Image (cartoon, coloured by chain):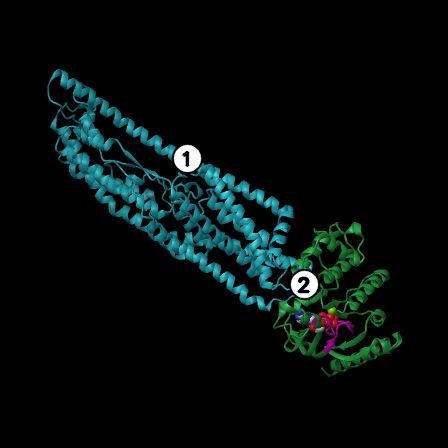
Chain colours: A cyan, B green
Amino acid sequence: MKRIIISHEARQLFRSGAFRALLLLMAGAVAFAAWSGQRSIDRQAEGANAAAAFEDGRRARMREGTEQYQARVLAEGGEYQFASASHSPGAGPPQGTNPGVVGSTTAKYLTLPPTGLASFSIGQSDIQLSYVPVSMNPAMNITRDNELENPVNLMTGSFDIAFVVIFLLPIFILAISYDLLSSEKERGTLAMILAHPISLRELLASKIVARAGVLLAGILALGLAALLAVGASLDQTDTWVRFGLWMAATLLYALFWFALSVLVNVYGRNSAANGIALAGAWLALVVVAPTLVSLLATTLYPAPSRMELTTAARQAQTEAESAYMERLSEYYYDHLELVPEGDGSAMDFLTVAMANRNAVDKAVRPLHDEFQAQLNRQESLVQRFQFISPAIMMQLALNEISGTSADRYEHFLNQAYDFRAEWSEFFTVRFLQRSPLRPADYDQFPVFEHREEPFGAVMTRLLPSLLGMLALLATAIVVPLLRLRRYQVAAT
Amino acid sequence: MLQAVKLTKRYGGIEALKGLDMTVEGGDIYCLLGANGAGKTTTISLFLNFTEPDAGTASVCGLDVTREPLETKKLLAYIPEQVMLYGNLTALENLRYFAQLGGRDYSREEYRGFLSRVGLQPEAVDRRVKTYSKGMRQKVGVAIALAKQARALLLDEPTAGLDPKASNEFSELLLKLKSDGAAILMATHDLFRARETGTRIGIMREGRLVDELSTGEVTHADVEKIYLQHMHAGGHYAQQGASSA
Ligand SMILES: Nc1ncnc2c1ncn2[C@@H]1O[C@H](COP(=O)(O)OP(=O)(O)O)[C@@H](O)[C@H]1O
Ligand SMILES: [Mg+2]
């Protein structure tokens, strides 16, 4: 029985030029979004490679210097020595032998590897760079290149597949279902159908199944095509698990909008009224609610601006420096290159400079921590308020599924902070011991290995969003079911 | 076949039907006459379970329509004032869809057969129905009833606005259905055809059945006279009601 209506409805859909046009439009949007999302990921990868190549190149040249120096020492005899902090190119030991110089003037770039689905939802990776520099410099420099003014802004405007799903898919769904019953009523076919052994509920269900079936087949096909076209690591189960989760979330989200169409239709208004009501719902849920939540987060927990952070760092630096100034002549400070080679004072200066940095780091750390804490508070407010709009839940879910969530990024940053400590320790100890770096030591430099969070952690964060959407969907289904008994079918 | 017992329906404050009792047997064409607003459409809607009665029951072949809505709809066919179809489908496609909704299925030739039995020109069968005249659509409506093999038919002013020839053809179709043993309940304003085609006539006023006639026992002039008498009485009551309010 139902099958007849489903196939009839599907045929009617495909006969409609408007539907075919919408389908094409949707395919075009997904194709463009896939391309644009992939471009964004590629750019980050290029940026990461270029930055890493530059810094690694500098270290490689320093190592070459030490190799030549080592060869010379072997040939000419003498002691493998420690370079002073002199800038003058001379015959003495090269800068590469000085752990303090290597550790503080070159940076190690750490990369957060994108998941196979990263290009589906760029998330905030435009403003939270997936590669960060680590050196002996203060920890706050790690996020130096990030734009942290308003990271909770959900409307990042990047045109990725998540955008198509969250913004455009509902429009598409509403366009094919806003007049689900009202059109039949207005055409007069509703009474004709219901004079047959079909219940209103069955009719509605079949109409939804037809539309949702066609649409979800389309989404699955487009999603798969996008994954095969731009997706990475197709050989990893992780990618496919994420793709499955993506499809599940999209299904929930799509069904919610269908249910909303049904909900509006069972009130028996005409198609125009239904269209206006649903357009209003879209505007409220997809545009207004996320903006308000974002606004609320940044108003309640305003993050200090990056400018403030920088100013505070300068101040701390000045204070730290002034304490040491008394013990170090200005001459040394201003004319470092004139200090005679091997002069202990020059070495002292580097020690002092490193001590300064340490002091700055200590002084700025609370501010930096507070800054991060504010961002976390914003983030958790959004997480608490996500339940007022399926669009927010969906955005959080898709970011989580794509591995572009704020939490995964924080997990990465924490590793970066740990690595910075390890990196600093490595060079500081050698520097303070005045132990020169030999070529072989270059292989001993700390290596960063990104540790992926356990999948359970991802699911724990994902589940509230998915369950929230499920609850919303259930509500949007139950209300029409209760209301349906009162639906008036007019005989002419 | 079709039976209403103390059938009552209120719309808000308006009592559209006040304890209607009526029976339509198989082979009967029962014509419901009455002014606009008398409750004819409401009666038909209640038989179709489009709306629930406030009291009383409507039953089809002994089955209560509110308890067995799907079973009773298998037995019913409904032809409204305007048979509304899917304009972008052909007559045959429309017929097939509705027949399948009724749980039946036939071959293409059989569908053509139904459409030719109701007098639709063969060349029109594969045309989209959005180009159809009202008369043609009403014929498709009858074809749907035929294909459904309905035991009871509910018709709501099916010939309103049809030209005399089309109206006559429609009456011929009803007679065929009647001879097949269907119980037919038809709301109409056409007193002449009601007496010509109908077997019984019921006159409704303000939600009540005020008179019942057998067409064999009255002339056309009688029908008109009796009908007008009841309508005048109604007008009289209405005036009284208005002055006392
Ligand atoms: N859906 C409805 N809502 C409110 N009142 C209605 C509705 N349908 C019919 N009525 C009222 O019920 C009465 C009977 O209407 P109806 O059965 O359509 O009369 P008829 O078909 O004999 O012209 C009228 O007074 C009409 O205004
Ligand atoms: Mg009527």
Residue to which mark 1 is pinned: A42
Residue placed most toward the observer, B40 or B72: B72
Q: Position of residue A259 (x, y in %)?
A: 53, 58
Is residue B41 shown in magenta?
A: yes
Q: Name which residue lies at 56% across and 49% down.
A: A214
For residue B153, what is the image quadrant?
bottom right
The residue that label 2 is drawn on is A191
Is residue A101 inside the magenta stretch? no
Please tell me how crowded label 1 is: few (under 14), some (14-19), or many (20+) other residues with Cα within 10 Å.
Answer: few
Q: Quadrant of ligand 2?
A: bottom right
Judge whether residue A154 can be spotted in this image: no
Q: The residue tagged with tag 2: helix, strand or loop?
A: helix
**Residue extent of the magenta highlight:** B22-42
Q: Residue furthest top?
A: A76
Marks 1/2 same chain: yes
Q: Is residue A370 left or right of residue A237?
A: left
In this rendering, is residue A194 above or below B228?
A: above
